[in-house]
Amino acid sequence: MGYVTFIDGNLYRKRERALARYFRKSYKELIFKTIPKLKEDGKKDGLYTHELETEDLFKKVYGAITLKFTVKNDNVIIEEIEPSEMLTACYEKDLPIYKGVPYRNVNDLKKIKMMEAIMCQKKN
């Protein structure tokens, strides 16, 4: 059984805290399912990505929340949680939330409203 390390532990912790605050489902999946599974898995050496549970509206606007990691000699090195810019913004300051999706500025809010309208039209 290997161990889990981080390329940049400080940056990872900031993004993890942003997940904990704004994206509880993704955070719980990361902490209670994904990380323990990474410790147990016997994956071959290489670069991997794992998509965390993400709200549909957030996924349409910013992309899925994904964990990028490398396996080398049965040890896992976590490299990134994406979308990195959004998660960093979530950590740095309190962001307003619209329909469960945090946004950074007016343009992001417009994108969220537009995607919401498109998603509602497809359902009808």
Image (cartoon, helix red, strand yellow):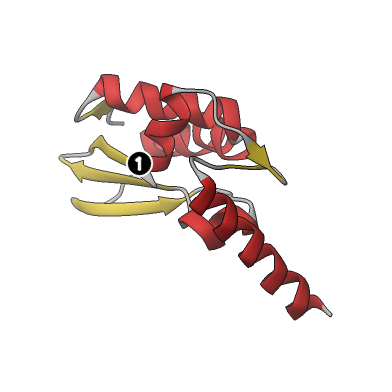
Q: Quadrant of the N terminus?
A: top left
Q: Amino acid at mark 1?
A: Glu
Left or right: residue 46 versus residue 11 is: left
Residue at the outermost left position: 73
Q: Say which residue appears at 22% left-offset and 45% top-offset.
A: 70
Is residue 89 visible from the viewing direction of this image?
yes
Q: How many marks?
A: 1
63 over 19 or under it: above or below? below
Question: Can you give x and y, in whole percent of width and height, for residue 42 in the image?
Answer: 32, 45
- The relative height of residue 101 versus residue 76 in the rendered view (above or below) is below
Residue at point 58%, 57% (across, down): 110
Eyeballing the image, is 93 above or below 79? above
Instruction: From the viewer's side, name the closer residue of 96 and 17.
Output: 96
Where is residue 80? Give x, y as percent: 30, 40
Q: Quadrant of residue 10?
A: top left
Q: Quadrant of residue 16?
A: top left
Residue 28 horizontal/vertical position (percent): 59, 32
Which type of secondary structure does the marked residue at label 1 adopt? helix
In this rendering, would 91 be left or right of 114? Answer: left
**Compared with residue 39, is residue 82 higher up or lower down, i.e. above or below?**
below
**On the picture, is 65 further left or further right than 68?**
right
Task: Quickly name the residue at label 1.
Answer: 85
Residue at the spot 21% in from the left edge and 26% down from the top edge:
8
Where, by quadrant of the figure, is residue 98 drawn?
top right
Question: How would you rate the neighbour count of disc 1 (Cα within 10 Å): few for under 14, some for 14-19, many for 20 or more?
Answer: few
Indicate the quadrant containing the C terminus: top left, top right, bottom left or bottom right. Answer: bottom right
Q: Is residue 82 visible?
A: no
Q: Residue at x 27, y 31 (%)?
A: 2
Q: Position of residue 22 (x, y in %)?
A: 59, 32
Q: Residue furthest front?
A: 106
Frontmost residue, 82 versus 35 = 82
